[in-house]
Image (cartoon, rainbow, N blue to C red):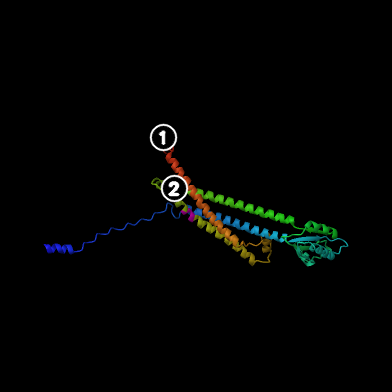
């Protein structure tokens, strides 16, 4: 018996049975990843982003064109000499040029010859013009220093005394009109952007309220068992952020493609009437790296604005639910009797 007991003591003890490991089941999102409402909202955000990016790019293009026009006009002044009987036009042109270049702030001057004047009048009077038979004024173009312009009033008075047929045009009227046009265009563009963003915010608010109305029972249960408002808002934010990023990326990419295609068409159709007219009205269709960076920034702003709108809407809706629960007159119709 003693040997049997010692044998039992020498035998190793059996290891305890392992318990099965507990695996946490991943929590499902409050909102389904894809549904009809989410796809419709994505399309609406894509359209709004396309319009916003298109407006921003157009405003940038018009501002760059107006700045180029303003710089070109500000660099030059024009002396116009009207033909009269007995006037030696060539001598008057040379005299006016020399008088203008005698002022500090002028750099260079050139006289427009007959061929250049004929090309300037060709769109209105056609080809084959004989300027000697027409009372067409002749022009002297003076290049000036933009940072240190000459005294235009003194130059105008000197030309009036020396060459009475000369008229000095410093283009101030056109510069002021261009500046006013650029400012008006910028204001209109910002107005359109504000309208687009407002429409997008209202659309997101209605979509968020619709999503919360369809999942109201889930939100109420989560909130009743202790889920904080920020947790519920975070879930909605995550869902709508994905939708807004996809929609904004699609709309911004489409707007960038429109500008790229327009620039490619303009570069491939040079020296054609359509391209010349478009260039004269709108300048080049290239918005540059700064314009594309602005389109990308507009996409990010749309996504952030959508997320902020969703968060505020969810928090306000949960506050309304808490207010209804805390008011017995709303939860129980007989409580007020």
Question: Residue 191 or 166: which is nearer the viewer?
Answer: 166
State whether residue 119 is above or below residue 32.
below
Q: Is residue 318 left or right of residue 137?
A: left
**Residue 23 falls in which quadrant of the image?**
bottom left
Majority secondary structure in the magenta region: helix
Query: In x, y percent, where is residue 248?
Result: 53, 57
Q: Is residue 139 visible?
A: no
CA–CA distance between discs 2 and 1?
A: 28 Å
Return the mark for residue 310. Answer: none
Question: Residue 53 or 224: which is nearer the viewer?
Answer: 224
Q: Looking at the figure, which quarter contains the N terminus?
A: bottom left
Q: Which residue shows up at 65% across the image and 54% down it? A: 185
Residue most toward the right?
A: 86
Determine whether label 2 and label 1 are within 8 Å by CB: no
Q: Is residue 20 left or right of residue 220?
A: left
Please state which of the two labelled residues, at mark 2 or mark 1, is closer to the viewer. 2
Can you identify the residue that label 2 sits on? Answer: 229
Question: Residue 199 lies in magenta, yes or no?
Answer: no
Query: In x, y percent, where is residue 133?
Result: 84, 64
- Which mark is first along the chain, 1 or 2? 2
- Crowding at dot 2, Cα within 10 Å, few <14 / some 14-19 / many 20+, comes out as some
**Residue 67 falls in which quadrant of the image?**
bottom right
State whether residue 16 is above or below residue 312.
below
Return the mark for residue 335. Answer: 1
Query: In x, y percent, where is residue 292?
Result: 58, 61
* Circle 1 SS class: helix
Q: Which stretch is magenta?
A: 238-242
Q: Is residue 179 left or right of residue 247?
A: right
> How many marks on residues?
2
Q: Which residue shows up at 48% across the image and 53% down it? A: 240
């Amino acid at each position: 018996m003693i040997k049997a007991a010692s044998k039992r003591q020498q035998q190793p003890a059996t290891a305890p049975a392992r318990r099965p490991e507990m695996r946490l089941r991943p929590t499902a999102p409050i909102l389904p990843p894809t549904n009809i409402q989410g796809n419709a909202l994505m399309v609406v955000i894509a359209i709004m982003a396309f319009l916003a990016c298109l407006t921003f790019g157009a405003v940038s293009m018009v501002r760059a064109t107006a700045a180029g026009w303003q710089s070109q006009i500000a660099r030059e002044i024009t002396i116009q000499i009207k033909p009269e009987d007995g006037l030696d036009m060539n001598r008057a042109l040379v005299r006016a040029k020399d008088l203008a270049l005698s002022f500090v702030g002028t750099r260079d001057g050139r006289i427009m010859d007959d061929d250049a004047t004929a090309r300037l009048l060709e769109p209105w009077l056609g080809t084959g013009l004989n300027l000697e038979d027409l009372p067409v004024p002749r022009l002297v173009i003076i290049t000036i220093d933009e940072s240190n312009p000459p005294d235009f009033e003194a130059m105008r008075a000197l030309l009036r005394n020396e060459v009475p047929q000369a008229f000095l045009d410093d283009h101030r009227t056109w510069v002021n009109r261009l500046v006013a046009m650029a400012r008006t265009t910028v204001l209109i563009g910002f107005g359109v952007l504000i309208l687009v963003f407002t429409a997008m915010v209202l659309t997101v608010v209605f979509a968020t309220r619709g999503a919360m109305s369809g999942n109201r029972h889930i939100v109420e249960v989560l909130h009743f068992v202790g889920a904080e408002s920020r947790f519920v808002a975070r879930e909605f934010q995550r869902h709508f952020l994905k939708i807004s990023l996809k929609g904004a990326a699609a709309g911004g990419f489409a707007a960038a493609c429109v500008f790229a295609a327009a620039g490619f068409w303009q570069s491939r159709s040079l020296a054609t009437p359509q391209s010349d007219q478009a260039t004269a009205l709108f300048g080049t269709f290239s918005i540059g790296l700064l314009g594309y960076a602005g389109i990308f920034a507009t996409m990010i702003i749309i996504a952030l604005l959508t997320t902020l709108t969703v968060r505020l809407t969810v928090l306000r809706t949960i506050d309304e639910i808490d207010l209804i629960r805390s008011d017995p007159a709303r939860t129980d119709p007989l409580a007020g009797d």
